[in-house]
Image (cartoon, rainbow, N blue to C red):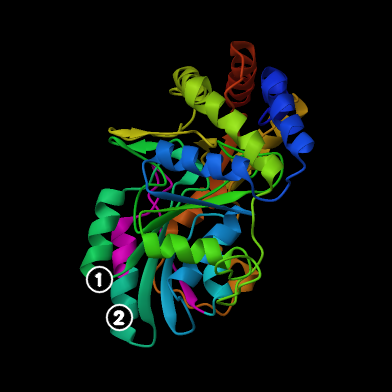
Amino acid sequence: MEFRDLKLQYKNLKTEMDQAIEEVLEKGAFIGGTAVAELEKQLADYVGVKHCITCANGTDALSMVMMAWNIQAGDAVFVPDFTFFASGEVVSFEGAVPVFYDVCRDTFNADVKSLEEAIEKVIEEGELTPKAIIAVDLFGQPADYLSLEKVAQKYGLLLLEDGAQGFGGMLGQRRACSFGDAATTSFFPAKPLGCYGDGGAIFTNDDKMADYLRSVKVHGKGEDKYDNVRIGWNSRLDTIQAAILSVKLKAFIEYELENVNKAAEKYTALLSGLVETPVVLEGYYSSWAQYTIKTESREQRDSLQNWLKDRDIPTMVYYSKEMHKQLAFKDVKSYVECPVTSQLCDTVLALPMHPYMTDQEIQKVTEGLRDFFNK
């Protein structure tokens, strides 16, 4: 059993995938070209924004937004304590300070009360300038952007949606990666929409920001790549990856997103009353980057993980350490306590999840959990 079965996905998409890759090989244009431009239009149309700017990976996407917003030393950017390292790393990379806030236990996403408390404490201290909020669509469900946008407006802050895991999710009629002042996503292979290597994208309705991003991702180009109007860097999506993503996006829209939601529904029905299952709030739709259960303790979680491993059932822990406890952030001041994050780091366990899961595989996983809790 695979945790996320990319081999089976390729088997299902093999004819279209091989043809798309072969077309790139035959044309011999491996950087840029029509495949990248067409993918960007497809992604922007799907999300419902004016501009999609692809780049080399999701971390670069976050970094380029920080650059476009001129985030720098002395600035504070508010980041969830329960997320992948990149969400805070990009803030420090620009010389600014990540200020960590807690998340909600049911959704794993931004706790708006904790966020506002952190903002107030930074303002009260007066040593940093609050500039932006990063909210993460963890495990596939969008964060509470209706509340987050109000907080951002109240304090005059920019809002960035980190949709690395949220692509395909929805809040009401709006799709993930359409919220805030800008949004980013990742096309890392294990993401809801993944390529066969690294890739990322930025989404925005801001024309000026889009122009800046298209420049800075190619060495600060102006009219062409030999006309350099600013200091930039090299962060382009390979043409082969764009072709791969176009094939995958079609499948994602036509049936993969629906299938992964059906798999989640089956998990929840079979595990109800046995273990704490993930919650999708009313009015929300998840793309299920992960299906994450909660145990009662770290000891129970680790025992369950080993139990399932012995039965050839792969699991993962996302995430085992709070952001504010990462060694790289040892000198970063904590402004608020994050007890929910600490509890989650001790108790979360992600089960196998992908659009091609069979009923037999779901049954095997759930029986493994049932045997563990009934032993």
State the extent of the magenta-drawn residues as a range. Answer: 96-117
Q: Determine whether 118 is above or below 318 in the image.
A: below
- Residue 303 as seen in the image, left or right of residue 178: right
Q: Secondary structure at mark 1?
A: helix
Q: Quadrant of residue 127?
A: bottom left
Image x and y of residue 256, in percent: 53, 23
Quadrant location of the C terminus in the rendered image = top right
What residue is drawn where x is 52% and y is 71%?
Answer: 91
- Please give the residue where the numbered disc 1 appears in the rendered image: 155
What residue is drawn where x is 45% and y is 21%?
Answer: 265
Q: Amino acid at mark 2?
A: Ile
Label 1 near label 2: C-beta < 8 Å? Answer: yes
Q: Earlier in the sequence, mark 2 or mark 1?
A: 2
Q: Determine whether 22 is above or below 296 in the image.
A: above
5 or 318: nearer the viewer: 5
- Residue 74 as seen in the image, left or right of residue 25: left
- Camera-side mark, 2 or 1: 1
Image x and y of residue 84, in percent: 57, 55
- Please give the residue where the numbered disc 2 appears in the rendered image: 123
